[in-house]
Image: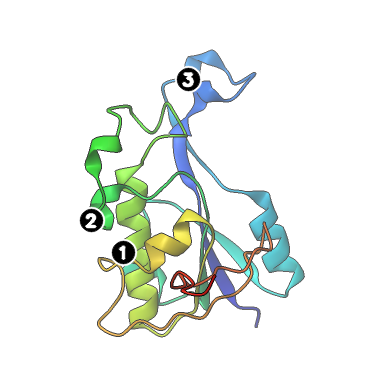
């Protein structure tokens, strides 16, 4: 039996898609980077796109792994950052702004996955989300792995060099 691997995406209004039917422009769609699904399938897994409406705890009963995809930065309130940088713009109409609904869903998903011992791969901003204090259980384990899409390995912060 092939493992089910959950993949997160983002939600935005259809009017952001060139050529979309204008009658449905005010409706939302969930979008996912096909590269993640393609690579999961090539590796033998079955990619499952996860909507924000999916209950994180319930879906983790079925998943063998979770990929938290990259995107806009995680909202600073999730990690104790400066919230003054947040613009008051609907993330469904501008994919470049913070998306609190996505952050809340992904943090809950990471928490549920880690509590069940399910591996989590966080790419780009998502790796920061997956290690934020609000997401991590009492003793998280960090296993850096290359991102499936950008192939970059996350790095732990290093202390500044004292030698010149």
Spatial distance from mark 3 to mark 1, Cα to Cα?
29 Å
The structure residue drawn at horizontal position 46% and vertical position 75%, both measured from the top left corner, is 62
10 Å crowding of disc 2: few (<14), some (14-19), many (20+): few
Residue 55 in sight here:
no
Furthest residue to the right? Answer: 42
How far is disc 3 from disc 2 in space, using C-alphas?
Answer: 35 Å
Residue 38 visible in the shown view: yes
Count how many numbered circles sit on residues in the image.
3
The percent coordinates of residue 17 (x first, y second) are 58, 25
Q: Using the image, tell me which numbered label, if any, was put on residue 80.
A: 2
Residue to which mark 1 is pinned: 108
Q: Are marks 1 and 2 in contact (CB under 8 Å)?
A: no
Q: Nearer the viewer, mark 3 or mark 2?
A: 2
* Nearer-N-terminus badge (1/2): 2
N-term mark: 3 or 2: 3
Residue 99: image tag: none
Q: Which residue shows up at 27% across the image and 58% down it?
A: 79
Residue carrying label 3: 25
Residue 139 in which image quadrant = bottom left
Q: Residue at x 23, y 50 (%)?
A: 77
Where is residue 48? Give x, y as percent: 56, 62
Q: Is residue 109 left or right of residue 25?
A: left
């Amino acid at each position: 039996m092939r493992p089910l691997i959950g993949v997160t995406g983002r939600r935005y209004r259809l009017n952001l898609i060139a050529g979309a039917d204008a009658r449905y422009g005010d409706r939302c769609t969930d979008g996912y980077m096909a590269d993640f699904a393609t690579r999961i399938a090539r590796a033998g897994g079955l990619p499952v796109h996860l909507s924000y409406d999916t209950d994180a705890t319930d879906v983790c009963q079925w998943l063998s792994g979770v990929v938290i995809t990259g995107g806009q930065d995680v909202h600073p309130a999730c990690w104790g950052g400066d919230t003054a940088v947040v613009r008051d713009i609907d993330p469904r109409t501008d994919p470049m702004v913070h998306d609190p609904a996505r952050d809340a869903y992904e943090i809950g998903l990471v928490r549920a996955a880690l509590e069940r011992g399910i591996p989590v791969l966080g790419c780009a901003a998502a790796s920061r989300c997956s290690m934020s204090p609000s997401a991590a259980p009492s003793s998280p384990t960090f296993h850096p792995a290359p991102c499936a899409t950008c192939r970059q390995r996350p790095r732990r912060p290093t202390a500044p060099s004292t030698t010149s």
